[in-house]
Amino acid sequence: MSDQSEFSIIQQYFEQLTSQREDVELGIGDDCALLRCPEDHVTAVSIDTLVENIHFFADVDPVTLGHKSLAVSLSDLAAMGATPAWFTLALTLPKVDEKWLKGFSTGLADIAKQHNIQLVGGDTTRGPLTISIQAHGHVKAHKAIKRSGAQAGDLIYVTGTLGDAGAALQLRLNQWHDDNLSRQDQQYLQQRLEMPTPRVEQGQLLSGIASAAIDISDGLLADLGHITRQSGVGARLDLAKLPISKALGKVNRTMAESLALESGDDYELCFTVPPHYFSELGARLADQCTQIGVITEQAGLSYIDENHGFLDLNISKAGYDHFK
Ligand code: ADP
Ligand code: MG
């Protein structure tokens, strides 16, 4: 991108996007940002890339795209129990589209302000529309929630409801249709796909009591599978307990369950809690999470189904893999 247009894009849309944090010694404008990490904390860092026609539809509202671009990175910070602090943005644009830039930066600014995370730098280039955001957060030393800490007997929970984003995607791709879904239901599901809510507060509240956590980007089975593999344990799920939204609850239960288990993009947290923290969890998260199963000694995932009894799940098929 020519120097002048790159410079003016940054100045016009991104320089004043967020408010100034005290721990930013130098933000946008130099070769590097200069940042101060609080004492006795470590920095949690995560990067995510969204590519047009792979992660989002070309006609998606740029405001929601700005929101989602940061939401997915905030969700990673949430899964570790970290507090958001700073982010950088690498933007590849096919052309300078003022309307798009205005919408995108507005959506990005709104969610950044909500979470007090500051844009401190980035890169702007020309090419197929691609958005990379690297988010940085703080977490007290030894308090980060890893995927590897689950133990047999721990209770498995998820925040929010599952399967909504997957349902919206199926509807959008015309691969599925259900007459029971009103226009309003469909709009709700679409909102869940395009404007996910990163569970940042919940993640922070889980630090100290959760033994493992992950955010659900690829689907419950795939992501819980990361916890069980990295922890060297297994899991048994109770399908009847899967939290399903009011909207998705209108379709038949088998379809809703399969979306809840296998579809991605929900950005809810899946976490495990030792049973002795059961009441502490209730005090901290109250009705913001649902117990869906228990960690078992034997590797692999299985589930209980009221109608079909006890079954093994094939987790190798679950989740989206870009290189398959
Ligand atoms: P350099 O040539 O050193 O890579 P650039 O000219 O790419 O620097 O960027 C100038 C400044 O603007 C840097 O501080 C950089 O971090 C920032 N910047 C570039 N693109 C973006 C963007 N999309 N969002 C936020 N900051 C950006
Ligand atoms: Mg550069």
Image (cartoon, rainbow, N blue to C red):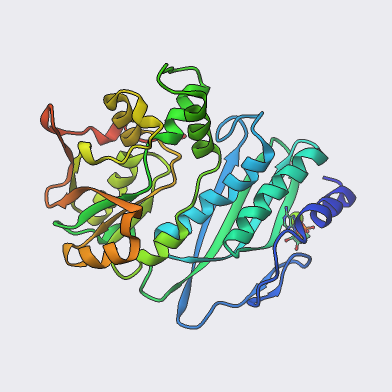
Q: Nearer the viewer, residue 246 or 227?
A: 246
The image shows residue 259, relative to residue 11, as above or below, that is above
Q: Nearer the viewer, residue 39 or 288?
A: 288
Q: Quadrant of ligand 1?
A: bottom right
Q: Nearer the viewer, residue 187 or 145?
A: 187
Left or right placement of residue 7 versus residue 223 in this view: right
For residue 320, say whether it is visible.
no
Relative image position of residue 309 (x, y in whole percent): 9, 31
Q: Quadrant of the C terminus?
A: top left
The image shows residue 81, relative to residue 239, as above or below, that is below
- Work out which residue is located at the far bottom of the displayed protein and give it: 39
Residue displayed at 68% across by 39% down: 62
Snapshot quadrant of residue 98 = top right
- Work out which residue is located at the far right of the displayed protein and give it: 4
Count of numbered circles on the image: 0
For residue 186, say whether it is visible.
yes
Residue displayed at 66% across by 48% down: 107
Relative image position of residue 92 (x, y in whole percent): 71, 43
Residue displayed at 28% across by 45% down: 225
Q: Quadrant of the N terminus?
A: top right
The image shows residue 308, relative to residue 239, as above or below, that is above
Residue displayed at 43% across by 29% down: 167
Relative image position of residue 36 (x, y in whole percent): 60, 78
Relative image position of residue 186 (x, y in whole percent): 49, 27
